[in-house]
Amino acid sequence: MSKKEEKKVEENKDDTKELEKELQKETKVYEDLEKTQKENEKLKKELKEQEEMLKNTQLQYVSLKNEFDSFSNRVKKNEEKQKDEIFEKIILKIIPVIELFVSSYEHLPKEFEGHKWTE
């Protein structure tokens, strides 16, 4: 082999080494890209799961809030009803006493009509 041929063979070897290095770099970049894409898909899936959990949690919150509001309204209505019932019971107990006062006032003797207690 001549020196020119040896030189060309050497240059070809160098070119081949450079091409191999470039190929390795591209392969590494491709592997990194695949890894990143897989991680991206995984993160998208996690995001979707988190969004579903958020929706469910929001629905649970709204449902619980509605239940609490309903309970609070029932308690208020119950309190008002009990107050009315207590007032009614007291009035029903007082009415006979008032009727007795009215009856006694109607049958009051004439000499007591001008007295300050009878007023």
Image (cartoon, helix red, strand yellow):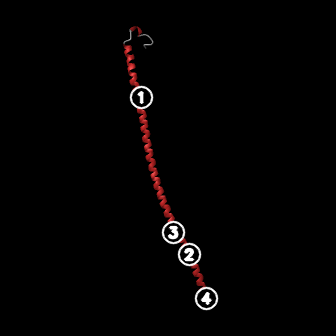
User: In the image, what residue type sits under mark 2?
Assistant: Gln
Disc 2 packing (10 Å; few <14; some 14–19; many ≥20): few
Mark 4 residue element: helix
Sequence-first tag of 2 and 1: 2
Q: Residue at x 61, y 87 (%)?
A: 7
Horizontal arrangement in the rendering, residue 32 relative to residue 96 (left or right) = right
Q: Which residue position is annotated with label 1?
A: 86
Q: Which residue position is annotated with label 3?
A: 34
Q: Nearer the viewer, residue 63 or 115?
A: 63
Q: Which residue position is annotated with label 4?
A: 6
Residue 114: image location, x then y, percent: 42, 10
Sequence-first tag of 4 and 2: 4
User: In the image, what residue type sits under mark 4?
Assistant: Glu
Q: Which residue position is annotated with label 2?
A: 24
Quadrant of res 28: bottom right
Residue 88: image location, x then y, percent: 39, 27
Q: Residue at x 44, y 39 (%)?
A: 72
Judged by depth in the image, the label closer to the viewer, 2 or 1, is: 1
